[in-house]
Amino acid sequence: MPRRLVSAGRAVMGCLLLACAPAAPCFGAGNPTFSGEGTAVILEGDQATALQLAETAALRQAVARAVESVIQPGTSEERTYHAKKGEILIEPYPFLVERRTGKPQITGKVVQVSVLIAVDREALTRFLGTKGVLSDRTAQRKRKAFPSVLVLIGEEIGGKLNTSPYSARIVTQTFLDQGFGVVDEAAVQKAVLHDQAVQGLLRGDAKAAQAVALQYGAGVVISGKSVAEATAMKAGAMQAYAANVTLQAVYADSGRILATASADGSHPHIDAVTGSRKAVEEAAGKAASRLLQSLQEQFERSEDSLLVSISGINYRQLTVLKQILARDFRTITSMESKSFQADVAKLALTIESSPQEFVDQLVLKDFGPFRLDLISFSPRKIDLVVKMKESTPH
């Protein structure tokens, strides 16, 4: 290599080492960087406005390049991004870590400005998730983590309880066909609690169904009511039968309703049993499809709700804890104190990470004089206890 090139290379390396010295960390400090260029025309001698317009255009271009580095080309993500581009590229940008504006170049009445930005890629991904751009990724992640389902439906045919509900079989099969894990309802039917849960559903009390779901390891219970009866319509020997099925998907641990759906069905037949069954199956199929559609919309949202119960905590510790959570856990988008009784506090959180990731971060976090130990964890509920750290003798 020519001596001149070697010297130049050493000089450049020396500059880089100086630029990256501990006292003056490199731009971006490990975060990806993107550049943008903007141009504007000076009108009526207003150079300041032209400079501002050029800088804004350069920043938007840099942000657009950062966003496009996350999005998978040729997918629905890209189509959604272009549809929402105007909304996404508006300040503020919560994922922006650093920003530098180059010296403007003015040629006649034309102003050119360059901008260099560094972004937090995780924050950018969360931001795009809140905008619905990464809905396919979010839905895939949530569906994979979705707990097993228990279907419990109280069914009345002609005013009498049907102990082998047609509607439950249809809903179960619909969810199985879509790849959901479903608890064997036939095994559950053998339990006394199953009968109590069904009677509770017919009386409008869904808590008994939640108890059965928890007992059999189901994270979500699809409960509901199905009613079929003969109508006043007749055509010769044919009798018309009508049915109505209402469903709701509820997290068994927290009781939070995920989605609801209802549908009607009808079928004419000379046989009461066959006519009622056909009407119920039609209504149940429609209701199950609507419930699945509602769940899919839930999956596409990047945020998750979480109920956190903390025992052994006083109000001062709770105040400190909430401040730390708000400051250090950027995935928390909202936090609400639900209750504080004796030494037990309950917080309702909305998070942009998966509940499992959040719990892992929570139990490893240093809260100063105390720590949080995990008692139990389920998809939408965490039970923690405060433990004071042992002081070390000096």
Image (cartoon, helix red, strand yellow):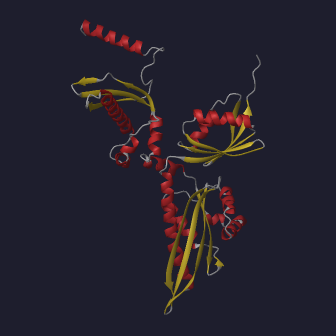
The spot of residue 266 in percent (x, y) is: 50, 79
* Residue most extreme to the front: 44
* Residue most extreme to the bottom: 236
Q: Nearer the viewer, residue 40 or 274?
A: 40
Quadrant for the N terminus, please.
top left
The spot of residue 135 in percent (x, y) is: 44, 49
User: In the displayed structure, would residue 310 be above or below residue 112?
Assistant: below
Any part of residue 161 in sight = yes
Is 178 displayed left or right of 60 in the figure?
Answer: right
| Image quadrant in which you'd find residue 252 | bottom right
Any part of residue 36 in sight = no
* Residue most extreme to the top: 3
**Residue in view at x 66 percent, y 35 percent:** 321
Quadrant for the C terminus, please.
top right
Is 227 displayed left or right of 13 in the figure?
Answer: right
The spot of residue 239 in percent (x, y) is: 52, 87
